[in-house]
């Protein structure tokens, strides 16, 4: 399986609901983890500039929200 396919599946795990905060390096979203059903905060970090129409980002879960 291609690396991009794996990244897409990981990103598809979360349903972004609202922006909690935004900075120069990325955005923190309130999201639903579709695997567990829990509400979480996820951080999307911009890793570089746009290349060939694709933005390079990293996504990580940072906190379980109540």
Image: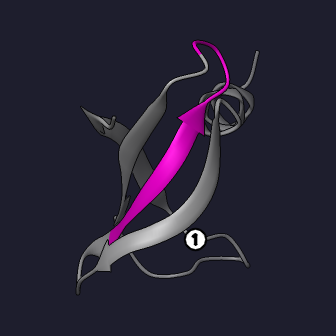
Q: Secondary structure at mark 1?
A: loop
What secondary structure is the magenta-colored segment mainly?
strand
In percent of the image, x 54 and y 67: which residue is there? 18
Q: Using a 10 Å C-alpha cutoff, classify the residue at mark 1 as few (fewer than 14 neighbours), some (14 to 19) or many (20 or more).
A: few
User: Magenta stretch: residue 58 in it?
Assistant: no
Where is residue 48 shown, x and y percent of the image?
37, 73
The image quarter in which residue 24 lies: bottom left
Where is residue 65 shown, x and y percent of the image?
32, 37
Q: Which residues are magenta?
A: 27-36
In percent of the image, x 40 and y 37: which residue is there? 40
Residue farthest along the bottom direction in this orientation: 24
Q: Give the side of residue 7 with respect to residue 12, left or right.
A: left
27 and 51: which one is in front?
A: 27
The image quarter in which residue 46 lies: bottom left
Against 52, residue 9 (above or below) is above
**Residue that mark 1 sits on:** 55
Picture colour scheme:
one colour
29 and 11: which one is in front?
A: 29
User: Magenta stretch: residue 31 in it?
Assistant: yes
Q: Give the side of residue 35 with respect to residue 29, left or right.
A: right
Against 11, residue 24 (above or below) is below
47 and 45: which one is in front?
A: 45
Looking at the rendered image, the quarter that the N terminus falls into is top right
Looking at the rendered image, the quarter that the C terminus falls into is top left
Where is residue 35 shown, x and y percent of the image?
64, 14
In percent of the image, x 73 and y 25: which residue is there? 2
Where is residue 11 shown, x and y percent of the image?
61, 39
């Amino acid at each position: 399986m291609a690396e991009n396919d794996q990244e897409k599946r990981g990103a598809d795990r979360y349903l972004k609901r609202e922006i909690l905060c935004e900075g120069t390096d990325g955005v923190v979203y309130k999201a639903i983890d579709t695997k567990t059903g829990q509400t979480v905060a996820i951080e999307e970090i911009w890793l570089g500039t746009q290349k060939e129409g694709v933005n390079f980002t990293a996504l990580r879960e940072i906190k379980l929200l109540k």
